[in-house]
Image (cartoon, rainbow, N blue to C red):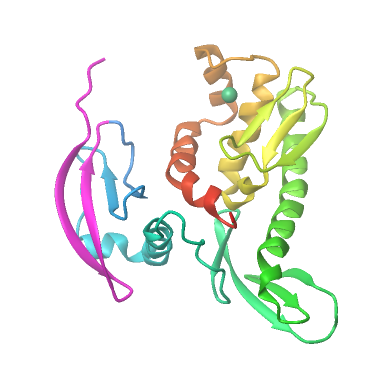
Amino acid sequence: MHRDPPRVEARGSVPIGGETVPYEIVRSPRARHIRLRVGPDPILRIIAPPAARLGAIPHLLEPHGSWILRQLAAFQTAPGTPPHPIQPGQALPFLGASLCLRITAGPPAKLTVARQGDLLVVHLPDGDDHLLPAALEAWYRDQARAVLHQRASHWSARLGLAFGRLSIRDQRTRWGSCSSEGNLNFSWRLVMAPMDVLDYVVIHELTHLRIPNHSPRFWQEVARHCPAYREHIGWLKDHGDSVSGFLRT
Ligand SMILES: [Zn+2]
């Protein structure tokens, strides 16, 4: 079926959190709903279905202000420069929400990372924040192991598909994969995504245990358990760069 290519409808700039952010409105026949995208250039793109009404742009963007600024900061970093340092008060993505980073120092002498409601408290006995990225990654990996084991067991029972071992990795280019022996691999970075996106990846890999390709039958099978899978693929496309760049040194 012929479809018109996406087209830039308007360009402008909008104040967000004291910064002036350049944006483009892109009308795309493939878009099912309005979404925001940043990168690879530091421009905010508002991607909308052809007939969607956007209303006032500042009003539309207001709830997403801090997300937009974080994305722009990530893409404004020139190649070769060190990644944006992690700072107290920073929002850390976790299962579709965000945790606020708090750092404590002093006794006791053990480095710990603990979630307290919406806070993620990292205790650095010597106040040595060089240890921070590794401590955060270890915490994310622990969460990923627990959450992905739980979700894989849940969906394995629902789909009637047994898997072998489950491994947590840091795969740069893939969210998940499966082996011919029935083992599943997932990126720990999936716990930065909302739970239904994570579930989609689990369902995708489990379904491969029965159908090892991306045929129409495969997608039908995925859709039976995950009707909104296209939206989840869209989320992974939109956020993949920032999620895979997080804590990357
Ligand atoms: Zn696949």
Quick one: quadrant of the C terminus?
A: bottom right
Q: Residue furthest right?
A: 109
Give left or right: position of 207 versus 193: right
| Magenta highlight on residue 67 | no
Q: Is residue 45 above or below residue 164?
A: below
Residue drawn 70% across the image and 77% down it: 128
Name the one closer to the observer, 10 or 159: 10
Q: Quadrant of residue 185?
A: top right
- Front position in the image: 159 or 23: 23
> If the picture is divided into quarters, which one holds ligand 1?
top right
The residue shown at (75%, 69%) is 114
The quarter of the displayed image where residue 183 is located: top right
Q: Residue 155 in the image: state x and y as whole percent.
A: 71, 32
What's drawn in magenta, residue-wise?
Answer: 1-29
- Residue 6 vs residue 96, the one in the foreground: 6
Which x, y percent locates residue 170? 66, 43
Q: Position of residue 240 (x, y in %)?
A: 49, 44
Farthest residue, direction bottom: 106
Q: Is residue 157 left or right of residue 33?
A: right
Image location (x, y in percent) of residue 224: 57, 24
Q: Nearer the viewer, residue 112 or 162?
A: 112
Say which quarter of the image contains residue 67.
bottom left
Residue 44 seen by the camera? yes
